[in-house]
Image: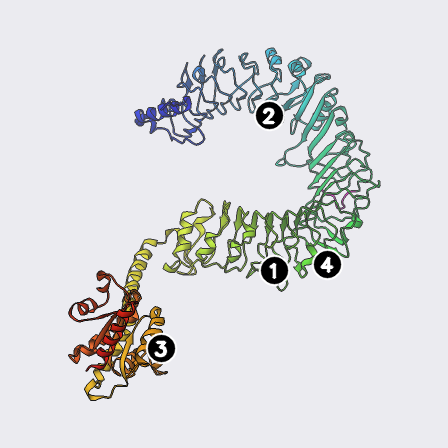
């Protein structure tokens, strides 16, 4: 067998681990997706037992002190090396020679006092270099060969200048320079020469630096993808002067303001952000920690922005600024008491207003007949809306996303979403809904794909409220109530549904017809209900389910036939916090739980509550073997008893005639000499030979001279008596002789054999051989032995053989008549 290179490397690595087993004990050998961890093992050297095939090595929080030449074993596949806080002070030349294919190197938190001039020379493929908190004083590092470098993270050092080495201007893929929390206070024009050459795909992070002065023109003709200057100025005055000096800078996304954890600052000038007008940006992310006693103007320098995010703000009113290109407006955690009027922003496509104080809403004031607004999120504002919702969104037919969740109360009248037919997402969860006309609640929303009305205090009384939602894929109704048996029908029109949440709805039973038409359902949430049976999960309509949550219900057992019909694609099932019956009668479900822990969520919380309501005994710990032994013993005993009964019953059935005859013998019988026989002969024959008996035997004997009276069970047995009693009393005991018509059918007939044995019993007890054998057709000698006594009887006594030859036939009847008449 020929091994591939990868297989050979894995094989050699395994041998190396075994050979160095003693040394390998120093390191936690965790190989998962080719990742190897030696995290926090207090190691003072790099173990040679590291597998050759690893792609990621976490060696953080150890004690290396210094990295000498070729300190690492040969690891050609290693791409990520983490040496965070390993107390490294010296890095010599060619340290990383044996790991030259690294794409990410992390040296965070090491007190590096010496970088060898050629320590990074071999890392030609390095893309991310992290030197956070290593004591750097400058960006002038010897990294000429790192031409593929994309990210350089050097935050929390003592760097005083943003000036990059000149050779980095040729780094075509370089896109991120993280200088946060350094000691940069002045930025001059000659400091940004390389930044100007790198291009517009650059992200520059200068947050938490004590910026005091930026030379005018320092960022002239500099194009940045992102600029982060949060908490980057020593004062508001420094901020104003530095922002004014950014004239000529073009940035796609600007992050500024203070961090959330910082204290708010009172300002006297409400126009303190006017210096922003000097910066050309598309998007701005602002955390405002400044407040003023007078009305503040934040937005008039943002008129050209396409996206504004005010994460924290102390504004009380949205100023009336005519934005030119604004598409997205996010206002979070402000002092606004009224949802702002956006009639002056015709270009707006997305509006998000989230507050921590109650707000009023008088409509968004769209001033054009065909607004571009598509996304509206007013969640968490404690709004109280009357007669919602279309009158609050006049001339806004393009709204596709509407979130009014986590508010106080919304009342809805007839056709509340008229004019909003393009809605695809409607979220109303945890807002009290007062609905006047349930039938028209969701009328016309044929494009709706996502609906959340969880915990809205409503009761579904008519299933027809969902009649227009043919395109709905996600329906969340947790915490609501259902009237009567409405649950049986309300899903019948929602044929594209993929996610259904009916948690905490007080559901005690789900009909098997409830999911008719939901063949696409993949996720079903039924937590915190009162379900006791899960038979509905065996329905073919639910075969596409991949996740089912039925935790916190009243399920004590699940029948085996239901378990066997669970969806084949099921990957997540939550049965936790149900009162399962852990007994030997429920071993099927317990064994299923043990064998399917890979798909069970919180399997450790599946307890045997029937042992005790407060029991914390886990179902997976139940001893099934003891049940198996008990079950085997019970089965063996049961089988023995049943077998005995079956055997006795079979014997009684098989020998029922003999038993009856035995009881007759016990009560005595009249011998032939003591009674007057009613018939000259009783004929024993197979029903298949009935034609011959009727047409030949009866015709020649009963119509002959003198007539011979024959007893045939088909005509002479008394009604009301059992067959056995008739055979004995009327046939054998009531006839002087017995004629046995032997044929193949006679041999195969159990009744014929039984009659013949009874006849033998009588005549043996009377010591009188009054049995006449008539051979109707030749039978093999071996087959005559199947009938008890027949073969012996044929040997010792004469018999008559029927023949179709006329002469032989005449002699046959003469001899038969003579045998019957003679005593």
Please identify, in this view, whether the residue under mark 2 or under mark 1 is nearer the observer: 1
Q: Are marks 1 and 4 in contact (CB under 8 Å)?
A: no
Residue 152 image offset from top left, x and y in percent: 57, 21
Report the predominant secondary structure element of the magenta stretch: loop
Kindly state the secondary structure of the residue where label 4 is placed: helix
Q: Are marks 2 and 1 in contact (CB under 8 Å)?
A: no
Question: Where 8 falls versus 773 (above or below)?
Answer: above
Question: Where 816 falls versus 100 (above or below)?
Answer: below
Q: Is residue 435 visible?
A: no
Real-space CA distance between mark 2 and mark 4, rounded to the nearest whole angstrom: 58 Å
Q: Say which label, 2 or 1, has the lower sequence index.
A: 2
Please identify, in this view, whether the residue under mark 1 or under mark 4 is nearer the observer: 1
> Mark 3 sits on what residue?
714
Please identify, in this view, whether the residue under mark 3 or under mark 2 is nearer the observer: 3
Real-space CA distance between mark 1 and mark 4, rounded to the nearest whole angstrom: 17 Å
> Mark 4 sits on what residue?
439
């Amino acid at each position: 067998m020929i091994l591939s290179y990868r297989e050979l490397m894995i094989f050699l690595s395994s041998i190396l681990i075994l050979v160095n087993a003693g040394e390998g004990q120093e390191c936690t050998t965790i190989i998962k997706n080719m990742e190897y961890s030696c995290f926090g093992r207090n190691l003072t050297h790099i173990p040679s037992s590291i597998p050759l095939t690893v792609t990621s090595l976490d060696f953080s929080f150890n004690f290396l002190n210094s990295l000498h030449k070729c300190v690492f074993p040969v690891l050609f596949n290693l791409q990520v090396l983490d040496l965070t806080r390993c107390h490294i002070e010296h890095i010599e030349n060619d340290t990383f020679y044996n790991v030259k294919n690294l794409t990410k190197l992390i040296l965070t938190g090491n007190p590096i006092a010496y970088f060898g001039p050629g320590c990074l020379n071999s890392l030609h493929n390095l893309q991310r270099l992290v030197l956070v908190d290593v004591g750097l004083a400058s960006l002038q590092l010897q990294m000429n060969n790192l031409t593929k470098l994309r990210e350089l993270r050097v935050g929390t050092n003592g760097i005083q200048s943003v000036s990059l080495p000149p050779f980095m201007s040729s780094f075509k893929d370089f896109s991120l320079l993280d200088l946060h929390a350094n000691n940069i206070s002045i930025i001059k024009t000659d400091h940004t020469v390389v930044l100007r050459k790198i291009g517009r795909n650059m992200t520059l992070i200068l947050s938490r630096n004590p910026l005091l002065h930026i030379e005018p023109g320092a960022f002239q003709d500099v194009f940045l993808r992102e600029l982060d200057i949060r908490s980057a100025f020593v004062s508001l005055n420094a901020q104003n002067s530095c922002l004014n000096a950014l004239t000529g800078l073009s940035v796609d996304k600007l992050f500024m303001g203070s961090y959330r954890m910082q204290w708010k600052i009172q300002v006297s000038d409400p126009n303190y952000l006017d210096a922003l007008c000097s910066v050309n940006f598309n998007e701005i992310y602002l955390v405002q920690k400044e407040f003023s006693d007078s009305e503040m103007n934040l937005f008039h320098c943002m008129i050209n922005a396409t996206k504004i995010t005010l994460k924290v703000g102390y504004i009380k009113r949205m100023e009336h600024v005519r934005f030119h290109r604004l598409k997205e407006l996010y206002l979070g955690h402000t002092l606004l008491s009224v949802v702002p009027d956006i009639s002056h922003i015709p270009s707006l496509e997305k509006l998000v207003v989230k507050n921590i104080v109650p707000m009023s809403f008088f409509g968004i004031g769209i001033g054009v007949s065909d607004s571009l607004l598509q996304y509206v999120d007013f969640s968490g504002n404690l709004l109280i809306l009357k007669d919602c919702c279309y009158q609050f969104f006049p001339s806004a037919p393009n709204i596709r996303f509407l979130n009014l969740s986590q508010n106080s109360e919304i009342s809805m009248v007839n056709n509340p979403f008229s004019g909003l037919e393009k809605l695809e997402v409607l979220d109303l969860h945890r807002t009290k809904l007062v609905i006047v006309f349930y039938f028209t609640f969701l009328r016309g929303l044929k494009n709706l794909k996502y609906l959340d009305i969880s915990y809205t205090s409503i009761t579904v009384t008519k299933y027809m409220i969902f009649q227009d939602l043919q395109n709905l894929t996600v329906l969340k109704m947790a915490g609501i109530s259902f009237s009567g048996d409405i649950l049986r029908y309300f899903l019948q029109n929602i044929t594209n549904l993929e996610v259904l949440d009916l948690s905490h709805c007080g559901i005690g039973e789900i009909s098997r017809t409830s999911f008719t038409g939901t063949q696409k359902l993949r996720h079903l949430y039924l937590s915190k209900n009162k379900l006791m049976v899960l038979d509905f999960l065996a329905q073919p309509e639910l075969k596409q389910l991949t996740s089912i949550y039925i935790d916190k219900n009243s399920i004590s057992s699940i029948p085996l036939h239901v378990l066997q019909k669970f969806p084949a694609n099921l990957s997540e099932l939550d049965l936790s916090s149900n009162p399962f019956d852990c007994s030997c009668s429920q071993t099927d479900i317990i064994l299923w739980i043990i064998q399917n822990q890979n798909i069970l969520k919180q399997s450790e919380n599946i307890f045997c509550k029937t042992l005790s309501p407060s029991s914390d005994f886990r179902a997976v710990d139940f001893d099934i073997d003891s049940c198996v032994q008990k079950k085997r013993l019970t089965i063996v005993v049961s089988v023995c008893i049943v077998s005995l009964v079956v055997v006795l019953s079979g014997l009684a059935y098989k020998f029922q005639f003999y038993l009856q005859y035995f009881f007759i013998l016990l009560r005595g019988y009249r011998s032939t000499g003591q009674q007057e026989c009613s018939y000259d002969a009783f004929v024993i024959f197979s029903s298949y030979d009935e034609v011959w008996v009727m047409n030949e035997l009866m015709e020649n004997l009963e119509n002959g001279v003198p007539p011979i009276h024959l007893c045939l069970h088909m005509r002479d047995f008394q009604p009301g008596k059992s067959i056995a009693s008739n055979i004995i009393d009327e046939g054998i005991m009531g006839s002087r002789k017995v004629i046995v018509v032997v044929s193949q059918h006679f041999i195969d007939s159990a009744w014929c054999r039984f009659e013949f044995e009874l006849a033998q019993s009588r005549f043996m007890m009377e010591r009188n051989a009054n049995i006449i054998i008539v051979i109707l057709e030749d039978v093999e000698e071996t087959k005559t032995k199947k009938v008890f006594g027949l073969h012996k009887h044929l040997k010792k006594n004469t018999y008559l053989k029927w023949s179709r030859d006329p002469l032989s036939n005449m002699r046959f009847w003469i001899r038969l008549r003579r045998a019957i008449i003679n005593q």
